[in-house]
Image (cartoon, grey):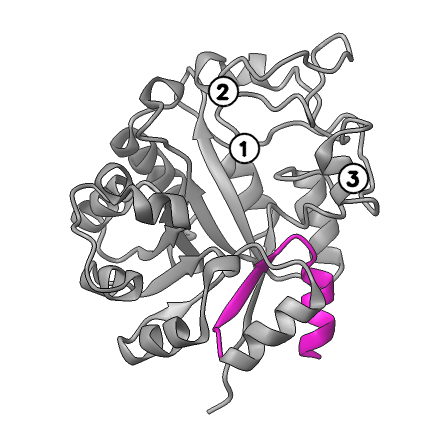
Amino acid sequence: MTRIFDIQGHRGARALFPENTLEGFLAAAALGVGAFELDVGMTADGVPVVVHDPLLNPDIVRGPGGLWLAEPGPAVWSLTLAELQTYDVGRLRPGSRAAGLFPEHRPHDGARIPTLAAVLDALPDARFTIEIKTDPAHQAWTATPAALAEATLTVIDEAKAAERVLVEAFDWRVQHRIGHIRPDIRLAWLTRPETVLNAALWWDGVEPLLSVPAAVAAQGGPVWAPDYASLTRDQVLEAHALGLSVLPWTVNQPEDMRRLMDWGVDGLISDRPDLALGLLA
């Protein structure tokens, strides 16, 4: 059997195009990217939208008058969809950390934060890993995990996209809710060192076991999505022995991509999916 290696564009292809925008997803698809990782929040009027930061990020957001935001905010959760879409997210702020990291970024002035429904509709043949963004340390910034999970499921169902999505979160209340009401939806379990160390906050009462892969397997898997920088070869072997797929994030350098491919991971989430596709070819 031919092994399928899953390359996913992170927020579209964040290093090349405006992140989490229709323009960015379509441009990445034109490069041959067929799967995407994106983030979902909710507006004040209950619309799931594709956005990473719960507070509008001044490194990528300009206000209705065209000026860069002076500080983070307002919260996406405090704005209606109509209000949110007055903000421009088509360019990196000059001199920002993101602009330094992504010198090949191609702006698209006028890009807006899209609805999840619009993205699923625009790319009917693509697969999506949908990260539901809630933070147990800042619960007032977003809708509740249950409300956001259920609203996201409604959009997925209306798009008839259940078979082409994977849903993930660092806040494991999300997966527990979805697993309870929709066991047909495939789940991934996001981890990074900070959430592992503070599992009492992030893992919804799950006790850390002897290892992170064992904790994920105990939840039913089927996918573990770890921070690539903290991942070891032994963890990949353990995860596979437990029946898990391993999908590390966010892998941008070719040498790291090659190393992880050699370790046998099942895919990569990358800001440069074009480079990953080139290595795979």
Q: Tell me which amino acid carries mark 2.
A: Val
Q: Which residue is mark 2?
A: 76
Instruction: Name the disc covering residue 51, or none.
Output: 1
Residue at screen point 32% across, 76% down: 238
Kindly indicate whether the residue at mark 2 contacts the one at mark 3 (C-beta within 8 angstroms): no
Q: Position of residue 268 (x, y in %)?
A: 55, 64
Q: Secondary structure at mark 3?
A: helix
Magenta highlight on residue 275 = yes
Q: Position of residue 162 (x, y in %)?
A: 38, 54
Q: CA distance from mark 3 to mark 2?
A: 26 Å
Q: Which residue is mark 3?
A: 100
Q: Quadrant of residue 212?
A: bottom left
Q: CA distance from mark 3 to mark 1?
A: 21 Å
Q: Quadrant of residue 101?
A: top right
Instruction: Sort mark 2 into few (<14), some (14-19) or many (20+) by Cα contacts within 10 Å.
Output: many
Q: Position of residue 49 (x, y in %)?
A: 50, 31
Residue at screen point 26% across, 75% down: 242
Question: Which-is-in-front pick, marks 3 and 2?
Answer: 3
Instruction: Sort mark 1 into few (<14), some (14-19) or many (20+) by Cα contacts within 10 Å.
Output: many
Q: Which residues are magenta?
A: 264-281
Q: Tell me which amino acid carries mark 1.
A: Val
Query: Which residue in the rendered view is the most extreme toward the top?
Result: 65
